[in-house]
Image: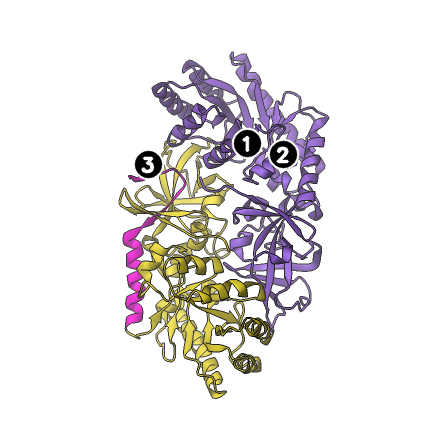
Chain colours: A yellow, B purple
Amino acid sequence: MRRHHLPTPSLLLDEARLRRNIARLDERLRAPGVALRPHCKTCKSMDVARLCMVSPQGPITVSTLAEAEYFAEHGVTDICYAVGVTPGKLARALALRQRGIRLSLLLDSAESARQLAAFARERKHIFDLLLEIDCDGHRSGLRPDDPELTETAALLAGAGQNLMGVLTHAGSAYDLPNPGPEVFAALAEQERGAAVRAAQRLREAGHACPVVSVGSTPTAFYGENFTGVSEVRAGVYMFQDLVMAGLGVCRPEDIALSVLCTVIGRRKDSGNLVVDAGWMALSRDTGLPGRFAREGYGLVCDADGKPLPGLRVAETNQEHGIIAACEGLCPPLPVGTLLRVLPVHACATAAAFDAYHVCRGQEITAVWPRCRGW
Amino acid sequence: MRRHHLPTPSLLLDEARLRRNIARLDERLRAPGVALRPHCKTCKSMDVARLCMVSPQGPITVSTLAEAEYFAEHGVTDICYAVGVTPGKLARALALRQRGIRLSLLLDSAESARQLAAFARERKHIFDLLLEIDCDGHRSGLRPDDPELTETAALLAGAGQNLMGVLTHAGSAYDLPNPGPEVFAALAEQERGAAVRAAQRLREAGHACPVVSVGSTPTAFYGENFTGVSEVRAGVYMFQDLVMAGLGVCRPEDIALSVLCTVIGRRKDSGNLVVDAGWMALSRDTGLPGRFAREGYGLVCDADGKPLPGLRVAETNQEHGIIAACEGLCPPLPVGTLLRVLPVHACATAAAFDAYHVCRGQEITAVWPRCRGW
């Protein structure tokens, strides 16, 4: 199939860029010799995951049980569910484990550990568990020096559960006031330090703690020291996006994902173009306030993916995108013209679609489905 | 099934509120005697549409061909596709029409009309067409006095196409600086005036123009004069949301849609709660800049839907929502506590889910699927 036969909006995945992005992080992590556990919350696709994993069985990271079930269905057996688990999710997690999936679960409080221990006791199951560490005040987790860390570990060990180690995520990497290689390197060291410190405390308390899991796309690319780290997680690196380009982690020409859309009209007063990709296709994500105002809801390119300088998706309604010129007028493109929009946030844009249309130039070489839901 | 057996996040639809919202607009439009063509881009569900339509065959409005195909599959035969059509979409539109679906298409330029006429000539088909009118500079359409209006109509008539009339949408209703009943009534009159004026010009030029279609949820509720209007379109009125509540079009207790989620943790420093509904479930839509900052990504309620005053979803990551108190600390809810979040923008929140869980109190009485994609 050729690109111009696709309905619009469609989600394009440039295979050459995808492979280059994957190779870049693989190479980056080869020198320190640290393992990669790709986060498949961005791609939600077995076809993409196959290109990222070291083996057809994984390991991978996921953010929902639906992803865990989908990847397990496709042969992945080593899965880290990296969102704090709650009692209501344990029956599904157990079902996966009883199918032979090494699904590890995340906790960040003694309260959660007690709830899990009660469930495990009742169902006579030993879960593989990680304690979430807060390395930067971003979201969740225990600080490495929090007494609750060892208390929680003792509670789990006392309940006969398998505490595998610690996990942290420097989520503040996406929101740094002055991003740059040195800043990411410093944050990576902070991320590593917190995880290693927490693991050390747990080992001092008698827990083996073999897993020390860290990661975010910026810290994975710019971290200089992975001593004591057993694995790195990253997700958006596969596709990259304008947030990552804005942070300097990639170039716009590295972005593998784009939304193919069609010009459906032009406004006479402003000269603005109207396209058939609104927020339903592009998402409402405009990145960090202020920082990405230049691109609005996406960077406008021609159908071949070449940026059209000075154009931005200035506004979106459900199925309408308004393309405006940063200065002057938009080129008067005919109705029916195909354009491509590079996503602000790849995870959010991809989530609007059920499949990737994999492209090499104008050729659509494959359709790769995505999983979805919870 | 009971509510607490649902996985989280899940999308709840309060049937009593849904029926009340639908009845409210039906009653509102009864006095002027104007027909309603509900916009099903919000619900994307035949089960919801059945409650809104005057007959099982429609009429309805849609925003994608995928919606048109879905509703046609379920017996709806009168469908207005209210987004400007492009040549690439005509083959699918034709396929629907050849199945006996009265699908009307929208145009807003002589250029689009020429493209459609060429396709229609080649395929020997007469399409039902509407001309889009710009009543408020919101997005697309021709101004009622634009010479291109009659030029386009003449072009379509000359090509033997069926010009049914005009369609306009006062999209600026969602973005008024000082919203209120009088302001919406004035905008409704402006919307009506533009459509009626355009229809009059077309009639003077010899086109019958039986359809004069207007609408948005605010103008449908507050319009006082529907003279010359043949139908009103509205979509979000079925569910309502915090944008509509912020505009004064509904009360928060009218909002029929909510996301059921679970507390997965608490932050020790801030006391913030972490829930398993992030932007993937709630969407990144925070409404109009500045206006809805109070609720962030949604209004937090207990599991029964009673608002918890002073709480807001302050931040979202993909699968994490951070609930913060506007003042002081969040209540220290246990991990595992179920909460409900009322959506900022119902269309965007619903789009994250494949189905509604219809609820009456704690009882889940039905699962209503949604269509999706393009």
Q: Main secondary structure of the magenta part?
A: helix
| Residue A273, percent from left and from top | 43, 36
Q: Between marks 3 and 2, how big is the CA–CA gap? A: 35 Å
Q: Position of residue B49 (x, y in %)?
A: 59, 35
Query: Disc 3 and disc 1: Cα gap in Å?
Result: 26 Å
Left or right: residue A310 versus residue B344 is: left
The span from disc 2 to disc 1 (Cα, nearest Å) is 11 Å
A101 inside magenta stretch: no
How many numbered circles are shown? Answer: 3
Chain letter for mark 1: B
**Which quadrant would the N terminus of chain A be assigned to in this image?**
top left
Instruction: Give the residue type at disc 1.
Output: Thr
Label 3 crowd bin: few (<14), some (14–19), many (20+), radius 10 Å = few
Q: Which residues are magenta?
A: A1-30
The correct choice, above or below, for A250 with respect to B167 in the image is: below
Tell me where residue A75 appears, x and y as whole percent. Answer: 36, 60
Residue on which disc 3 sits: A5
Residue B290 shows in the view: yes
Name the image quarter holding residue B218: top right
Q: Chain of mark 2?
A: B
Disc 1: which residue: B61
- Type of the residue with mark 3: His
How many residues crowd around disc 2 within 10 Å: few (fewer than 14), some, or many (20 or more)? many
Is residue A99 or residue A316 the one in the foreground? A99
The quadrant in which residue B217 appears is: top right
Task: Decide if residue A70 is on the left or right side of residue A20.
Answer: right
Secondary structure under badge 2?
A: helix
Identify the residue at horizontal 34%, vertical 54% (top origin): A47
Q: Secondary structure at mark 1?
A: strand
Disc 3 versus disc 2: nearer the observer: 2
Q: Which residue is mark 2?
A: B52
Amino acid carrying label 2: it is Cys
